[in-house]
Structure formats: C-alpha cells, structure tokens
Amino acid sequence: MTILAIEDLASALKPGDIIAGLDLGTTTIGLSLSDKGRRFATPRTVISRKKFSIDAEALLAFAGKEVVKAFVIGLPINMDGSQGPRAQATRAFVRNMAEKTDIPFTFWDERLSTVAAERALIEMDVSRKKRADRIDSAAASFILQGALDRLLSIARAESPDAGF
C-alpha cells in the first residue's frame, strides 16, 4: 500500500478507476464512491467500527465488491492547521492498512466536511434521527468530492485542449 499525494494519485489512476472516500470516525467509517468518470461522489453505507482487523476486513470487502482502485481519507486537521490526536489516529489507521492492501491512500483535508454534510442534510429536510445515521457517509462524500474536483483540475492543467 502506498500513500500518495493527490497529484501522484492523478498520474496513477487509469480511466474508469473508481475511488472511495472515507470519513474515519471513532464509532463508524463513512463511505462514498466516485462514478467511473470521477465527476461525482455518492454517499454509501457506513461501517460500524469494532476493532481494527474487523474494520479493515469490512473496508476491503467493500473495496473488492466495488472495484475500488484508491481511497481518499479525510484528515482531521485543526482549524489552525495543526494536527491533533484524531489526525494521528487517522495516519495510524492508514499505516496499519499498509499490511492489508496495495490500494493507495490519499489524505484530504476534511475541515468542515461534517458541518457541510449536516447543512446539506438539513436543507434536504432529513430528520435529526436520520441525519445521525447518514452524516458520516455524507461527510465522506464531501471529502471525496473535494478530491475529485482537484483531480479534474489537475487533468485540465495537464491537457487544456482535452475538452473537459
């Protein structure tokens, strides 16, 4: 498994490769998937966290079923740009995944992704109870969409005449 910068991920992906977005929480892992054109992120299910080996197995089963070629994982950076215990836990999770898979990971600044996800769910008039069930996948979708937008920007810069 490799940890790639977003620019290196852009070079490593082939057309049609699907990317999964992850929002690593303390009790759940929110999941989202890109389409094959890597234009849209769609919220998927959540994985209820138990212990690392079980979580990794569930995540890799999801990746296998959906033919995921890369993961974009939200890195919880503090508003002042520093990295606290949650960022360290996320980095440790990715390091531990290195022993389990060759699928590359890219870290993505997830500041305010949960806030944005909650606002979107409120605007869609989703009840408080249902919001609690969907917030992590919605946040994973916001994380992935940010990365997809950046990948598109990189592709446009590399091929300005490609017709994007």
Image (cartoon, rainbow, N blue to C red):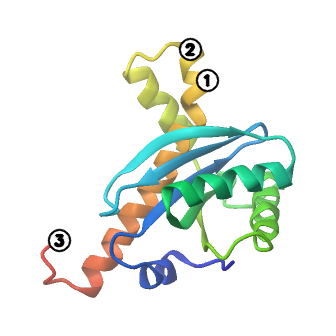
Please give the residue where the numbered disc 1 appears in the rendered image.
132
Q: Are marks 2 and 3 in contact (CB under 8 Å)?
A: no
- Residue at x-position 59% and y-position 79%: 4
Q: Which mark is residue 48?
A: none
Q: Nearer the viewer, residue 8 or 36?
A: 36
In the rendered structure, which amino acid carries the disc numbered 2? Arg
**Where 67 sits versus 122, above or below?**
below
Q: Classify residue 111 as left or right of residue 121.
A: right
The residue at the point 50 percent across, 48 percent down is: 32
Gap between marks 3 and 1 measured at Cα: 37 Å
Q: Position of residue 120 (x, y in %)?
A: 42, 30
Q: Quadrant of residue 132?
A: top right
Q: CA distance from mark 1 to mark 2?
A: 6 Å
Residue type of the residue flagged with mark 1: Ala
Quarter holding the N terminus?
A: bottom right
Q: Quadrant of residue 121?
A: top left
- Going 58% across and 60% down the picture, which residue do you hit? 64
Tag of residue 128: 2
| Left or right: 25, with 15 as reference point | right
Secondary structure of the residue carrying tag 1 is helix
User: Callout 3, which amino acid?
Assistant: Phe
